Image (spheres, grey):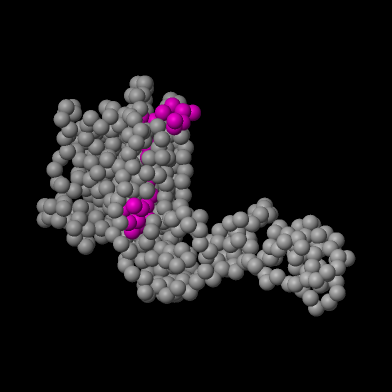
Amino acid sequence: MSQMPQLAACPSCEWPLESGDRFCGACGYDLSVVPPPPTDTPTITMNGTAPPPPDEAAPVSWPVAPEAGASDAPAPVHRPGDLRGTDSGGSEPHAEGAPQGEAPSSALSPSPSPSGAERPARGVRFDRPAESPSSDASAASDASASSPSAPSVSSSASPPSSPSSSSSSSSSSSDAGDYHLAAPRPVDPRTADLSTPPAGTKTCVACRAGQVDRDGYCENCGHAQPRERDHMEQELGAVAAVSDRGLRHHRNEDAFTVSSTALPDGSPAVVAIVCDGVSSATRPDDASLAASRAAGEVLLETLPRGTHPQQAMHDAIVAASNAVNSLAEEPRTAQEHAPHQNAPACTLVGVVVTSTLLIVGWVGDSRAYWVPMDRSSPPARLTEDDSWAAQMVAAGLMSEAEAYADHRAHAITGWLGADAYELEPHTASFKPDRPGVVVVCTDGLWNYAEAAEEMAEVVPLDAAQRPLHAAQVLVGHALDGGGHDNVTVAVLPFPAPPQGAGSA
């Protein structure tokens, strides 16, 4: 979810900043005098060639899905050989020469330091032995032998526990001659030969010398360490995902789950779940993580049993909602400290790709896009936002361009959480007639490539062969565009490759 822009790092020492900081905690830089950031220019990276069409897979004998009239049944299966785009221009995209078929009746109907120069960080203390020539060390050892008050000086750049340091000092104690004490110099962590930390411990990313305590701070220089979720990448051959904190938020409130399994007939099924925490709610990062994990677990449990993928996606969204609702059951003492905060909440979009079917499910404004690899047919957006803007467009009160230009455009009308309205999971099933990729993302990406055609321009041509590289390119596009929000994207080739086949 979007927030007011704020500095992500100190302009003086590049130390990460927290929301509301007025001074840098590392160097004391006055943040109130920082000029507004310049306007960023997006950079689009395109490369690669389209992969050859995959071999035709044998059809899967699916169990019959529940009828559409049932209260808990998902939407019916549709044929999206010609998916209707929902771009910002308000017009239906068509490519010349693309096959035309019957339009789906209800598939997508909405429901209510970069530079290479090295510079030392200001305000950082390196409490390590001074690095001195051997002659200075010998003289210093003489001083320590002749004067009990003279401080000892180590003669090696290695840590003080190194045996060579103590032996060098003791062997030079018998030497005679003039001496002087060199002023202690901090060891430059970029060039020092640092020892390997013990197993189970972490080394500080700032001074690269001290160990990190349980609270996430360096015991040597006191710097807070980057969170593990600030940047995450995962690749499982047929699917890859990347998540980044962005350039304005102080933490990453997105989460994802990617996995693969086999259907009862042995054919592959690839899963991707992407969740976006609602920033105005309590613990949005916990909400997105709980939802993505719960949904992924249900899909991995139900798909191998033969549950129709569309019904499995519906059940996964319900399980994710229950997981987020459980986070609201906090101790009474916690509620007393923050009585006016909303319950944890997040959005969700999920995709299941098989050898013949493409299943999409969502609640909120996270999206899924279809991009054909040969680019001879138009791309399409597979989801409709649960948002104020989408409702205005559906009601005919505004055009899509007018609605998304309004400051209320991204106010969501559907989400997962204890204080949400009645849960209405959206699901849709498609049978693409050609190979392509599915892009599953949060609004941190599609804010910079909203229309399906814009998203297709950013997706590399070899995305099906290199899904991780494609996800990295898409995240980079959002960061180049300003990175005003957390950004998470998963890329899944269609059809799903056979079990054991990875990306090139």
Q: Picture coordinates of residue 418 (x, y %)?
A: 37, 60
Residue 270 in percent (x, y) is at 41, 35
- In the image, is 173 to the left or to the right of 452? right
- How many numbered marks does the figure carry? 0
- Using residue 483 as the reference point, say whether residue 124 is left or right of it: right
Q: Name the image quarter holding the N terminus.
A: bottom left
- Report whether 277 appears left or right of 107: right
- Which sits in the foreground, 223 or 503? 223
Task: Look at the image and say whether residue 481 sits in the magenta stretch.
Answer: yes
User: What secondary structure prevails in the magenta region?
Assistant: loop
Outermost residue, right direction?
A: 174
Task: Please name whichever residue, 487 or 309, is drawn nearer the observer in this view of the structure.
Answer: 487
> Is 355 rendered above or below residue 121?
above
Left or right side of 498 for 482:
left
- Where residue 105 appears, as percent x and y from the top left, is 18, 37
Seen at 18% across and 48% down, the residue is 88
Residue drawn where x is 17% and y is 33% of the image = 95
Q: Is residue 439 above or below residue 251?
A: above
Residue 38 visible in the displayed image: yes
Residue 248 on image: x %, y %: 37, 61
- The stretch in magenta equals 479-504
